[in-house]
Image (tube, rainbow, N blue to C red):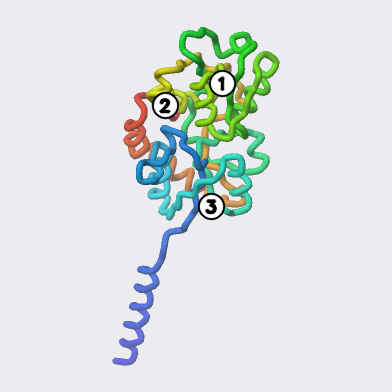
């Protein structure tokens, strides 16, 4: 009897040890290795902060995932995902049919307009006519570069940059007439001291759902269906329980989720 009890006790201890040692699934979360405020940017200590960092933490906690922030060069971020250097992309990547040929996406987690900014005191609109004869800066390998090439290249000279910050800096220095990007990140630049001094919003571009997509989603490998289910459930949960709205209010005074 004592021997039987000892065996049971040992089995229980082994089970408890196994449970205690169990770890959450670890996933590497990729995003562009550059400042992209208010979504992602390094603070004074080199830690990444911003709305998308808060979003990532919220869905990883909800889905019980051990998420490791993994900055990647933007123009190589999809290859990094498909080659398994990272496991998902949370980097303001728009859901487009072109990208769906290579990767899959979660449900959207925000949707904001595309806009154009330019020098103060130089009136023009975000149209082919308004940009005629101007130099327009865009970040390479983005929906904004694709949009500008399709809609503005016959009127304006399109100049591509590796990072959004480089385009903004050239606009501030007078080497560009305009910059196109997501309206939120452009507003963040306009709110900076440099942006306030040089530039202003010129307006939103006309919509093109084929190029601009249907909002921003988490990029995933096509075969990772279980992870996609976890992420979609987590997005739905944090929107329902108030977590999404709570951290969003720290950054925005409007509904970033969109329609």
Q: Secondary structure at mark 1?
A: loop
The image quadrant that residue 105 belongs to is top right
Camera-side residue: 120 or 116?
120
Q: Which residue is mark 3?
A: 226
Say if residue 128 shows up in the picture: no
Q: Which residue is mark 1?
A: 175
Foreground: disc 3 or disc 2: 2
Tell me how far mark 2 sits from mark 1, CA to CA: 20 Å
Residue count near mark 3 (Cα–Cα under 10 Å), binned few <14, some 14–19, many ≥20: few
Residue located 67% across and 23% down the image: 149
Work out whether mark 1 precedes mark 3 in sequence or the reverse, and give the earlier one: 1
- Residue 48: where, in percent of width, then height? 41, 43
Q: Secondary structure at mark 3?
A: helix
Foreground: disc 1 or disc 3: 1
**On screen, 177 above or below 247?**
above
Please give the label number shown on residue 100: none
Residue located 49% across and 21% down the image: 172
Tell me how far mark 3 sits from mark 2, CA to CA: 36 Å
The image quadrant that residue 205 belongs to is top right
The image quadrant that residue 102 belongs to is top right
Camera-side residue: 131 or 18?
131
Judge left or right: residue 244 versus residue 259.
Answer: left
Q: Which residue is mark 2?
A: 188
Camera-side residue: 1 or 240?
240
Work out whether mark 2 precedes mark 1 in sequence or the reverse, and give the earlier one: 1
The answer to whether marks 3 and 2 mark residues whose Cβ atoms lie closer than 8 Å is: no
Work out whether mark 3 precedes mark 2 in sequence or the reverse, and give the earlier one: 2
């Amino acid at each position: 009897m004592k021997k039987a009890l000892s065996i049971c006790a040992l089995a229980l201890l082994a089970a408890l040890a196994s449970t205690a040692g169990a770890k959450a699934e670890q996933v590497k979360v990729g995003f562009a290795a550059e400042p992209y405020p208010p979504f992602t940017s390094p603070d004074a200590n080199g830690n990444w902060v911003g709305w998308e960092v808060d979003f990532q933490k919220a869905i990883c906690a909800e889905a019980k995932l051990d998420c490791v922030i993994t900055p990647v060069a933007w123009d190589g971020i999809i290859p990094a995902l498909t080659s398994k250097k990272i496991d998902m992309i949370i980097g303001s990547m728009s859901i487009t049919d072109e990208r769906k040929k290579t990767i899959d996406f979660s449900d959207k987690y925000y949707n904001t307009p595309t806009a154009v900014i330019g020098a103060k005191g130089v009136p023009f609109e975000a149209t082919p006519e308004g940009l005629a004869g101007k130099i327009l800066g865009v970040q390479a390998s983005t929906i904004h570069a694709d949009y500008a090439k399709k809609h503005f290249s016959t009127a304006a000279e399109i100049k591509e940059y590796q990072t959004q910050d480089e385009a903004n800096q050239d606009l501030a220095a007078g080497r560009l007439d305009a910059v196109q990007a997501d309206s939120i990140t452009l507003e963040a630049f306009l709110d900076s001291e440099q942006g306030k001094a040089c530039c202003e919003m010129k307006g939103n571009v006309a919509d093109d759902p084929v190029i601009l997509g249907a909002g921003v989603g988490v990029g995933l490998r096509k075969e990772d269906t279980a992870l996609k289910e976890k992420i979609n459930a987590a997005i739905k949960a944090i929107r329902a329980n108030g977590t999404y709205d709570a951290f969003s209010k720290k950054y925005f005074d409007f509904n970033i989720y969109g329609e």
